[in-house]
Amino acid sequence: MDSAWSFYDKLIEGVDSTLIVDHFSLGVGWTEVWAGPYTGVAMTIKERGPVRLNTGIIEGKTLKDVSALIKSWDFLEASLGAAALNCFYNSIEKVTELGGLQDIDLKNLVPETRRKKNAFIAFQNQVENKKVLCIGHFPHIEKQLAGRCELKILERNPRKGDYPDSACEYLIPEQDFCFITGMTLTNKTLPRLLALAGKNVKVSIVGPSICLAPQLLDMGADNLSGFCVIDRKKMDEVVRYADKCEIFDAGVMVSIGER
């Protein structure tokens, strides 16, 4: 049986070892990593852990080494690892090859087309009258899905009406469809969530934090609905001024796998 870390090792092993990190920022809302022409972003998880994997300077390290920080139990450091994975896997070139930008004209982007691949809209017909669990309380999720399906929301910090994250063991196997926030890759819960879903629950991993690695489709995900950075300068502004800038102004939503 593979160890729990083999899930992460397969993602790290795929990263180009010749790419060098030349810039990073750990922001309040988002974390970014630059390597050559590529930019990756992931949501910042602020919880600190007992041990950090890296004690040196990040710039100048290989992107592969920084990607390995995804295995850190210091979630702020793991957020940097997630952004590094996304720097490699979430490039326009790679995602285009995987069909993730089908029907998107990158030369004529407007707010509607930037969000065209929003999973909660794209899968509205598929989840009609189905049992659906959303792991992570996404903005506007009730407006987008409630009334179309039997919706339950699972959240680490539950709002009124949400289930706590420990309910995953009981709720996931009962569902027809499950949306999982990409932040679960950073906090190390994704392997277990996919195992609970098995082959009977359709799974879409959602949000800017998920790396669009085809390996994840082999590990149990049916769809990856993530994000590609297009405007590096704008993304840097989003990281530094999160309260004033919208992340989707710096890139485009994309989708690979079943749609």
Image (cartoon, grey):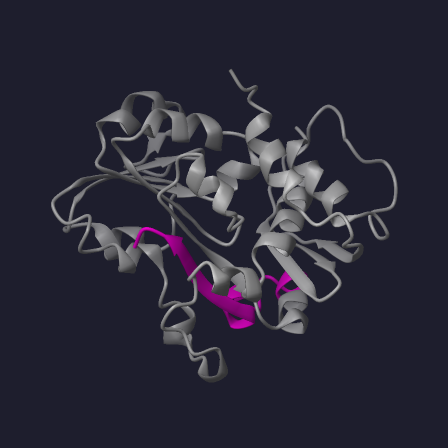
Quarter holding residue 109:
bottom left
236, above or below 126, in the image: below
Q: Is residue 172 left or right of residue 221?
A: left
Q: Measured from the top left, where is residue 246 in percent x and y?
A: 52, 67
Residue under the image location 49 percent in, 37 percent down: 184
Q: Is residue 225 left or right of residue 145?
A: right
Q: Quadrant of the C terminus?
A: bottom left
Q: Is residue 249 magenta?
A: yes
Q: Measured from the top left, where is residue 201 in percent x and y?
A: 27, 34
Q: Measured from the top left, where is residue 79 in percent x and y?
A: 64, 43
Q: Is residue 77 magenta?
A: no
Residue under the image location 76 percent in, 30 percent down: 52
Residue under the image location 50 percent in, 60 percent down: 95
Residue sitting farthest toward the left: 129
Quarter holding residue 150:
top left
Residue under the image location 23 percent in, 52 percent down: 145
- Residue segment shown in magenta: 238-259
102, above or below 195, in the image: below
Q: Is residue 136 left or right of residue 92?
A: left
Q: Is residue 16 left or right of residue 172?
A: right
Residue sitting farthest toward the bottom: 108
Q: Is residue 30 visible?
A: no
